[in-house]
């Protein structure tokens, strides 16, 4: 999937070329159908279409490599998981940078991560996020990847983490790793205490209305345990957080804990 970031970066040029080619071919087909009688008119018409496409394409703005969410927290943009847009994050700590889930590989993202001039670590929120690009990051920047041991045999794990843990690893005073089984046996969340930000992976997430998306209505895979997932969410109410930064679906900022408590009523 690493090619997607580079495609996305140059998309306005690629899309313009494809549309231009399509219009050119359509033009030729029409001229062939009408026997060439309208050739001059059609050429002029499609010339205007070409110009319109070029002007429209100039308005396509490339999304920046990252978005700063908190003073020390960044979302890495343009991330896709089997065609679905997702979220991956970088947390800057005093002596390291910590990735929560692994982005697709690109030179621009590599430059961003290494610009901090600190060793890089990554936590996989659940086995599905152990993408094959993780191996590339390990080789390129020495990324040290952590995953919960309960996800060792997760069917979607596509790389070999450096560390499988059962005791929650420590990355600094402001970071707490929380085991939240349910979406997978080894699913974890990470609390960044100073900003009251909870990285949830797919344990829970927001919807387009700013509420908690009702994952109880989603179809469960064989590696999921819905009742454990609910219990894990209830456990998270013991922690002090406001912002919810998930892998799939929508971010909730400012009222994440309140929204989760409301969602869990009666469950």
Image (cartoon, rainbow, N blue to C red):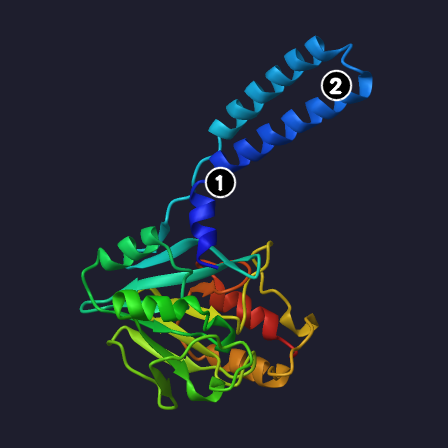
**Residue 194 visible, this orientation:** no
Q: Are marks 1 and 2 in contact (CB under 8 Å)?
A: no
Which residue is drawn at the image coordinates 60% and 30% (left, top)? Answer: 21
Question: Which quadrant of the view contains residue 116?
Answer: bottom left
The location of residue 152, given as percent across then percent down, is: 46, 86
Q: Which residue lies under the disc numbered 1?
A: 11
Above or below for 239 versus 44 = below
The location of residue 178, given as percent across then percent down, is: 41, 81
Q: Which residue lies under the disc numbered 2?
A: 31
Q: Position of 2 compared to 156: left or right?
A: left
The location of residue 183, given as percent across then percent down, is: 56, 78
Figure quadrant of the C terminus? bottom right
Outermost residue on the right side: it is 34
Which residue is drawn at the image coordinates 48% and 68% (left, top)? Answer: 257
Outermost residue on the bottom side: it is 166
Point out which mark residue 65 bears.
Answer: none
């Amino acid at each position: 999937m690493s090619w997607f970031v580079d495609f996305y970066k140059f998309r306005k040029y690629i899309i313009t070329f494809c549309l231009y080619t399509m219009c050119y071919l359509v033009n030729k087909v029409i001229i062939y159908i009408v026997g060439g009688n309208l050739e001059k008119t059609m050429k002029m018409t499609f010339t205007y279409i070409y110009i319109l496409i070029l002007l429209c394409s100039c308005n396509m703005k490339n999304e920046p490599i990252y978005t700063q969410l908190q003073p020390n927290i960044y979302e890495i943009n343009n991330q896709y998981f089997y065609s679905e847009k997702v979220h991956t994050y970088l947390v800057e700590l005093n002596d390291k940078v910590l990735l929560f889930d692994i982005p697709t590989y690109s030179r621009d993202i590599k430059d961003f991560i290494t610009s901090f001039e600190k060793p890089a670590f990554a936590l996989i929120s659940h086995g599905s996020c152990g993408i094959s690009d993780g191996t590339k990051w390990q080789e390129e920047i020495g990324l040290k990847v952590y995953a919960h041991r309960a996800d060792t045999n997760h069917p979607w794990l596509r790389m070999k983490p450096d560390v499988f843990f059962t005791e929650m690893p420590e990355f600094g005073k402001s970071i707490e790793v929380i085991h939240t089984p349910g979406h997978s046996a080894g699913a974890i969340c990470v609390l960044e205490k100073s900003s009251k930000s909870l990285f949830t992976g797919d344990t829970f997430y927001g919807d387009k209305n700013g509420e908690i998306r009702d994952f109880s209505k989603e179809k469960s895979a064989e590696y999921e345990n819905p009742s454990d997932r609910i219990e894990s969410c209830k456990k998270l109410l013991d922690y002090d957080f406001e912002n919810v930064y998930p892998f799939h679906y929508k971010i909730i900022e400012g009222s994440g804990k309140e929204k989760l408590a409301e969602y869990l009523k009666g469950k």
